[in-house]
Image: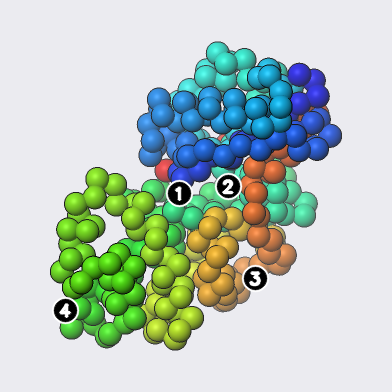
Amino acid sequence: MKDLVIGIDGGASKTIALLAGATGEMLGRAQLGGSNKQVSGVAATLATLDQVIEAVFAAAGRDVTQVASACLGLSGVDRDEDLALIRAWADERRLSNVLTVVNDARLVIAAGTPAGFGVGLICGTGSIAVGRAPDGRMGRAGGWGYLLGDEGSGYDIALRALRAACSAADGRAVPTLLLDTILQRWQLSQPSDLIPHVYHRAEARGLLAELPPLVSACAEQGDAVSIAILRGAGRDLAAAVAAVARELQIAPPLPLAIAGSVIQRTPLLQQALQHELAALGWPADPIHAVEEPAIGAVRLAREALESHNPTERCSRAAV
């Protein structure tokens, strides 16, 4: 037990667990589906956490045991009642001697900023910016979920693309490559087929996750509508990052860590983000792409083991 730490990164679409030694050497990795309580519900979220812990011990070739320290970076868990739920589950499971629960964007800061402060931006299915000042103060913007916000996210980009395609089909807006590209991707014969294809799905978000790469591909071919969508998304993401930097009074240049499949796989979106941040007076430097935020969870687990720092949290739960 005294030699092991667990770091977990739990988002809306996937949950990754790393088992490491006390000095940081990685012993096992496991990945399962999403563990966002606001999306999946309590029972499914806790079941996923149970399963990913068992899987990471199996990957390391070890029996499941209590570890010295665990850090869970979970989207959708910031409020006191959410934290109490996770702590009660961890205590019942005898997960660890020391437990740290943070928003998943906090992991991005831990893994991707040189001095452990700055802003972490996640842009995948959803979007959120979380910041940490040099004195340890935390701030956030975004993370309201796909109904209330998530501007600049993959879901938001997909909706913009669909609406632009439908407007073009009606002649209400300029033509765009997006219309034919989406129809071909979904093997639809005419624009009106979009209605049953989208509305008859019990869960449309998974379907829409296919669209951001198509927007990127059309933008790279010079499609003006696609370029405008990505620039608009970049403006929204930059506004969230700048809001956090202002709240925490982090002096520019701003250390920025980015994570999430959409922003990492869309160069034009990254360029728009950087351009808009500079225009807002918050040039970002350095910018680090975090491929494995769970590494940040391992680092936080080790730090907590050394200092027994209380859980850092922000004032509002991310969705």
Q: In whole angstroms, how far apart are the C-alphas of marks 3 and 1? A: 22 Å
Disc 4 crowd, CA 10 A, few/some/many (<14, 14-19, 20+): few
Q: Is residue 125 left or right of residue 73?
A: left
At mark 2, the secondary structure is: helix
Q: Give the percent coordinates (x, y) of residue 103.
A: 55, 40
Image vertical order of residue 174 relative to residue 298, above or below: below
What's under tag 4, amino acid-wise?
Asp
Disc 1 crowd, CA 10 A, few/some/many (<14, 14-19, 20+): many
First in residue order: circle 2 vs circle 4:
2
First in residue order: circle 3 vs circle 1:
1
Picture residue at 71% right of the left edge, 67% below the top: 285
Viewer-nearest of labels 4 and 3? Answer: 4
First in residue order: circle 1 vs circle 2:
2
Image quarter in which the C terminus is found: top left
Question: Residue 15 shows which numbered tag?
Answer: none
Whether pointer 1 and pointer 2 mark residues with C-beta atoms closer than 8 Å, the reply is yes
What's under tag 2, amino acid-wise?
Ala
Looking at the rendering, which quadrant does residue 254 occupy? bottom right
Asked whether 94 or 32 is in front, the reply is 32
Q: What residue is disc 3 on?
A: 283
Q: What residue is disc 2 on?
A: 105
Q: In whole angstroms, how far apart are the C-alphas of marks 2 and 4? A: 40 Å
Q: In whole angstroms, how far apart are the C-alphas of marks 2 and 3? A: 20 Å
Whether pointer 2 and pointer 3 mark residues with C-beta atoms closer than 8 Å, the reply is no
Viewer-nearest of labels 3 and 1? Answer: 1
Look at the image and tell me whether residue 315 can be seen. no
Asked whether 10 or 141 is in front, the reply is 10
Q: What residue is disc 1 on?
A: 143
What's under tag 3, amino acid-wise?
Pro
First in residue order: circle 2 vs circle 3:
2
